[in-house]
Amino acid sequence: MVSVKREFEAYLDQLDVITILVPEKQRNTYTPPFYIGKDPNSQLKELSVVSSESIGTHVKYIVKVGAPLTLGATYYLFSSSKQRTDLQTGAVIRTKEFDEAYYYEEKLGCIYHASKSIFRLWAPTATASKVRLKNTATEEEFIFPMIRKDRGVFEAVVSRNIEGWEYLYEVCVNLQWNLTVDPYAEAVTANGKEGIVIDPQKTAVTRHNPVILKHPTDAIIYETHIRDFSIHPNSGISNNGKYLAFTEYETTNNEGYSTGVAYVKEIGVTHIELLPFNDFGGVDENNPSESYNWGYNPIHFNAPEGSYATNPEDPYNRIIELKKAIQALHKKGLGVIMDVVYNHVYDHLKSPFELTVPGYYFRYDENGTPSNGTGVGNDIASERLMARRYIIDSIEHWVKEYDVDGLRFDLMGILDIETMMQIKKRLNEVKPGMLIFGEGWNLATPLADHEKAIITNSHKLEGIGFFNDKFRDSVKGSTFSLQDRGFALGNSRKIDPLKQEIAGKGIPSTQSVNYVESHDNHTFWDKMAKACSEENDQTKRLRQRLALSIVLLSPGIPFIHSGQEFYRTKFGHENSYCAGDGVNQIDWDKRAAFHEDISYFKKMAALRKQHPAFRFHSSLESNHLEFFGENTPGLIAYRLHSLETIDEWKEIIVIHHNQREREIVSLPSNKRYTLVCDPYSFDLGETTVTHSLEISEIGTYVLYHT
């Protein structure tokens, strides 16, 4: 490609509108009229100047072409004295007209066959593209030119078997050649430096029936990090920190208590949510023990992370081991939720998105600077048609190929409503009954609030769940103020806000993901270390049991952070995303130390699963919940009416108490109730009460009437 010295600059900002920037010191040299053509010897067309203004160091001219330009060719701008510059791609790629003109529907990426492989790359602003192939075993290397097809797609057909070959794209945009991994790459080399051509049929594993729930509120979600789950020396697991840890059944710690998958199955959760396992930055896949990361640094969205594989150099290894892990969990009746990060990339300028279609996949503010609602320097523009298509394609890939059962969207509020609803529609077609939920925080990204997938728009996102931060903060206190106490920490001023969330007055119960702890921020135990520093550990344990009981028994979707049930600590680390194993690992020693607390959690989870009254399946069912006991200090009490005739429990009473003072709670009727549990134990025999219940401890009491 011929290099050109840019004496001034010109950008295509609409298909028929160009912005010309002339240095102020050259304003008398590079003057209108301006002309456009493909080279100095071609017929030049005079451009119409719409406006001009001084913008400090430059003079800006807005000119009209007269007819839309077709991208994919190199155009030059000439001043009246024949100085020239090439026409660069500008804001045109962020216009509706561009989206409509270049939207492409056919399959993209590498399409493998034994006799040939087809490479397709969407790069409408590129003037040329090549695919570079290398066989590392034989040192053969080839570069194939790609042919520009309709709607800005480049295609190359390689008529031989190239399974296992590395490949990269070379893309020429604005006279600059970029070398990039395929955005659609499904297999990559160690640390994602190259894409790999694979035979998808060789990645197949035996499948087991997945977990399909009738209603999202039937789930109990258990969040964990693949490495945290098994890296502890007392995990009893051989494949420490690896995908294959989830294929090991019946593991125990040194004290003989269950660990790993056996433990998770035993405590009664329905789904394991795994922090991101698509290929991410921050960990050297060849030396994973040297660094640590949660995985919110996405690089290759369609390929598994290699640091969790036993052999990251083998592109098949990570794919097969991840698939085996998911199917091993399915075999034990556990669903798998994938934590997905489609709101940003790890390195904006080096990402395959930016190297193939610069400026398209990300949002920009009014000054042309990348927006930063995510806090990491870039926001993916999900509302653009091919960005949206990419996200949907990627999700469909994980569901079809890896058989995941749900999706947790990191910073879902960055994404737009239309994208989320199209995802839901596609998933209903591919695998009905999947769980879809995410973080609906309203972040400062250049998208109108009414278009964002945020909590206040939950009514526009039926069937999609939201982390309920008001529920969280009402139970434990503000996440961002360590000293602030919630209801479970003894603050009775949080009673009314919590009752609102239990009743589904904020987020509807069917969409409310109820939690008090996740991988983010301080653990519940660490917050109490500051907010309740004057209390002893026994009292704190009661408070954490209370919080867990509120999560498990409230209408909505309960979400548990792994190890929370046995008082997980990160030793005061508020943001442990790269703090290492010593801080982040699940401490399987505590599995033995707090086995009684775990047994309590297990029975509380079973209670929820056994009785539909705890699991509203529609917003109308909130009428079956009524509060009482408003005049009793430190108390939230409510009555649930049975929702199904098959349940012999016709009424259920739930009482949450945050004080150690003795109280007499008047029950709402003269019926005879059986006490199921108190803050210490379950299965209390035939303890019955009629008019009132005496309580004197921090925790939860459950009664029922038949």
Image (cartoon, rainbow, N blue to C red):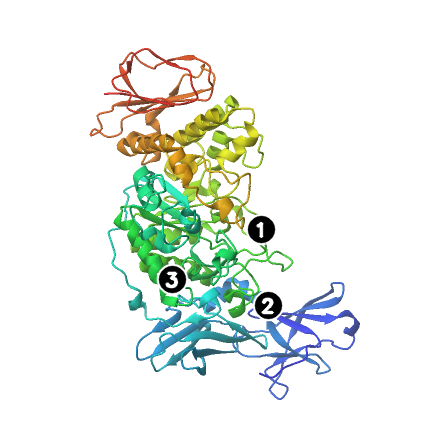
* Dot 3: element: helix
Residue 176, horizontal then vertical, whole percent = 58, 76
State the CA–CA distance, disc 2 to disc 3: 39 Å
Determine which of the numbered discs, if any, sits on residue 318 in the image.
Answer: 3
**Residue 484 coordinates in the image, percent (x, y):** 56, 29
Q: Residue at horizontal 38%, vertical 43%?
A: 462
- Against 234, is 310 above or below? below
The amino acid type of the residue labelled 3 equals Arg
Residue type, numbered disc 1: Gly
Mark 1 — residue? 375
Indicate the position of residue 476 as horizontal and vertical percent values: 49, 31
Q: Nearer the viewer, residue 40 or 559?
A: 559
Q: Position of residue 581 (x, y in %)?
A: 49, 48
Q: 676 or 149: which is nearer to us?
A: 676
Q: Which residue is mark 2?
A: 90
Up-down relation of residue 271 to residue 365 (above or below): above
- Give the residue at x 47% y 30%: 475
Picture quarter with the N terminus: bottom right
Q: Nearer the viewer, mark 1 or mark 2?
A: 1
Disc 2 and disc 3 in contact, CB within 8 angstroms: no
Q: How many marks?
A: 3
Which of the pair 365/407 is nearer the observer?
A: 407
User: Do the numbered discs 1 and 2 sit on residues whose CB atoms are within 8 Å?
Assistant: no
